[in-house]
Amino acid sequence: MKIVKAGISSVQDLGRTGYRNAGITTGGVMDRMALRLCNLLVANEPGAACIEISAGPWECTADRPLLLAVGGHGQQVWCGERPVNRWQPFLLEAGEILRIESPLGGYAVLAVHGGCKSPVVLGSRSTHLAGKFGGWEGRLLAGGDDIPTGQLFSPAAAKIISLLRGGTGRRQFRLSDAVIPNYERDCFRYVPGHEAGWFNDAAAESLSSLSFILTNLSNRTGARLSGEPLRLHHHQEMLSTAVVPGTMQVSADGQLLVLLADAQTAGGYPRIGQLVAPDIGLLAQQKPGSNLRFKVVSREEAEALCLAQQQAFEQLRKDFSLYFS
């Protein structure tokens, strides 16, 4: 896969786990469900490495046919001169140009059958920009990069390609709307954090009843929001302690911060909540200026939400495997 225009993009997978005690962040894609779904569409394992695009325009070409799928929030995709829908497999023929634009500013996931074959570092192909390792030379992609991909088509991929090329035109099939992430939802669920009891009653009420504006000061590390200040009962100092993607911190000025894929391993702001895992990617895909709300749930409800999402995806994998077996 030859990169023509790179925008702001990098190689990512589901991240590297087991190294946060050494100060190495998990990283990986911002929208984990989008990666799993796009990999499903191109007959990959769920965690196969993809290209994540956060700003464009982005373009690539190839010297052989590639089976691809694009997911994300609001991207526009063209393969040659024809528009392509998100959430469906399609073929990029040799010599064609694939173009992706992100007018809404979300994160696009581009999955290719066989995955992006960047070197594995500490169990992951994800780009670690701060450490300058992983991904493609530990950096953002650039025009002229030639990213190797898997060469051999699996039986499932061969059947998908046959269906795409069959008939009088290019057959199109895509995921059902019922399984595509609902990026229009503006309410995100959380469980109370370790320092939730440090905040006054007004702060707890505000977090569950008011909306907060997503600011431009947001990136892969975290989302900074603006809204009614969340105040402590009284000033308290705390030692830096563990944080993970989804941790909801409150800065010294009372503003809310939600950590995302590249979340640091420790932080010194009080943790008012922890976003449930299925909602982290949905929040990451919101555009600056969006009004976001939060709803508290119990730990039992949060566990049930995670389990339900995983069960639904595994059922989808089984259905997909049966259809293309």
Image: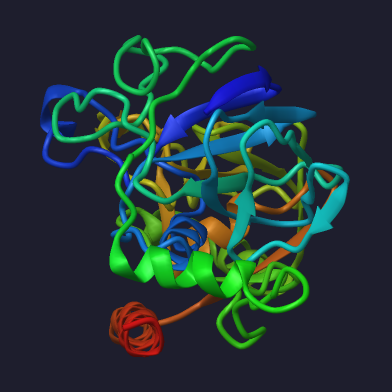
Front-lying residue, 96 or 262: 96
Residue 190 seen in the current view: no
For residue 8, which quarter of the picture?
top right
Q: Residue at x 18, y 33 (%)?
A: 20
Residue 232 location in percent, x, y? 51, 48
User: How many dots with numbers?
Assistant: 0
Quadrant of the drawing holding the C terminus: bottom left
- Whether residue 66 sits left or right of residue 180 in the image: it is left
Colouring: rainbow
Residue 11 location in percent, x, y? 44, 30
285 lies above or below 175: above
Front-lying residue, 325 or 108: 325
For residue 204, which quarter of the picture?
bottom right
- Whether residue 265 sits left or right of residue 283 in the image: it is left
For residue 323, which quarter of the picture?
bottom left
Q: Residue at x 70, y 74 (%)?
A: 172
Residue 203 location in percent, x, y? 60, 60
Residue 124 seen in the current view: yes
58 lies above or below 305: above
Q: Residue at x 49, y 49 (%)?
A: 111
- Whether residue 229 sits left or right of residue 235 in the image: it is right
Residue 287 location in percent, x, y? 77, 48
86 lies above or below 301: above
Q: Residue at x 56, y 48 (%)?
A: 109
